[in-house]
Amino acid sequence: MTIYFNGSFMPLEQAKVPVLDRGFIFGDGVYEVIPVYSRHAFRMREHLTRLQHSMDGIQLPNPHSMDAWVAILTELIARNAPEDQYLYLHITRGVAPRDHAFPKPPVAPTVFAMSNPLVHPPAALLHSGVACITATDNRWLRCDIKSIALLPNVLLRQSAVAAGCAEAILIRDDAFLTEGAASNIFVVKDGVLLAPPKDNLMLPGITYDVLLELAAANGIPHQVRRILKAELFAADELLLTSSTREVLAVTTLDGKTVGDGKPGAMFARLHELYQTFKREVMRK
Ligand code: PLP
């Protein structure tokens, strides 16, 4: 596997990060994940725009322009074998003596990007849907930043896995839905697709945006608004989205069936539209 590390391409084994890297010491950095289909990065510029938002959010100057990132990632894709990949980008505030405050003068950021094979959700999962648990959203108040400090998300996802589930669906203040530990969540009620608003309490998902665009373009009734905890439990359907999982139906929540316990009509429609959209984008 060839990776990009601080200006050079190299085998993964060659890249070494000093222990005083602020990513290692403080989790002081941000990241992105970009899916690649048939060697085409999907929504690359949107992902890089979100990366810029994350970097602005932690006051870390972006070491590369949009065009420079595109060039780096295009080469990274070309240097790796799989047709379908996912790119992982990771930028930290660099290596400096341990002190919470930013290094003064600033030091060079640590910049890392790798490509992994993209494993598509198995067909069986598309047919059965996935089981999820709910959990208290105990993260900070800047969940719009794609921070590498993921300990809350790690613990939340692990609680789902320990319960034999695919994801933890997060409820803030015992009152409303925010998102999944590493995904966005939609509720379907009476034929309407409901999405939580993009604010500081959730990551603005790129797949989330695509789903809402597809709903708008295809006359599917949809609303973006706060979704109460009670609405989550009374849903006809629940959908989970992320760059690597695309769109999945959530058919069990806290051990109870969602709707009739099978992936529903809204899932079928949006999943099909998403696949068609992907194919069209890849042809361009
Ligand atoms: N929310 C969180 C917390 C995530 O970590 C992710 C992605 O991994 C998402 C939402 C989905 O975002 P995207 O569709 O851009 O992958």
Image (cartoon, rainbow, N blue to C red):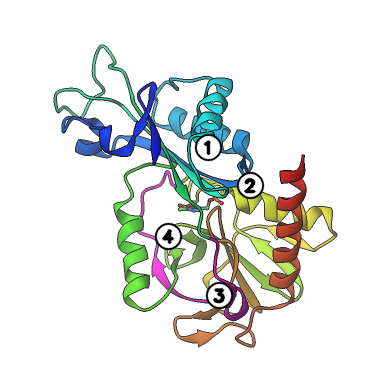
Q: Alpha-carbon distance for marks 2 and 3?
A: 22 Å
Seen at 69% across and 65% down, the residue is 271
Which amino acid is tagged 4?
A: Ala
Q: Is residue 166 above or below residue 37?
A: below
Q: Secondary structure at mark 4?
A: loop
Query: Along the line of sight, which residue is nearer the eye, 247 or 202?
Result: 247
Q: The disc labelled 3 sits on which kind of residue? A: Leu
Q: Which of the two labelled residues, at mark 2 and mark 3, occupies the earlier sequence position?
A: 2
Report if the beta carbon of the residue with label 4 is closer than 8 angstroms to ligand 1.
yes
Mark 2 = which residue?
Answer: 38
Give the residue type that dot 1 points to.
Ile
**Which amino acid type corresponds to the residue marked 2 in the rendered image?**
Ser
Mark 3 residue CB less than 8 A from any atom of ligand 1 = no
Disc 2 on helix, strand or loop?
loop
Q: Earlier in the sequence, mark 1 or mark 2?
A: 2
Residue wearing tag 3: 125
- Where 166 falls versus 139 (above or below)? below
Q: Residues within 10 Å of mark 3 (few under 14, many from 20)?
A: few
User: Closer to the observer: label 4 or label 3?
Assistant: 3
Q: Quick one: which residue is furthest to the right in this view?
A: 219
CA distance for labels 4 and 3: 19 Å
- Classify mark 2: residues with Cα within 10 Å, few (<14), some (14-19) or many (20+): few
Instruction: Find out whether residue 133 is within the magenta segment.
Output: yes
In the image: residue 89, left or right of residue 103: right
Residue corresponding to mark 1: 77
Give the residue furthest to the front: 81
What's the CA distance linking mark 1 and mark 2? 10 Å
Read off the magenta span.
Answer: 120-143
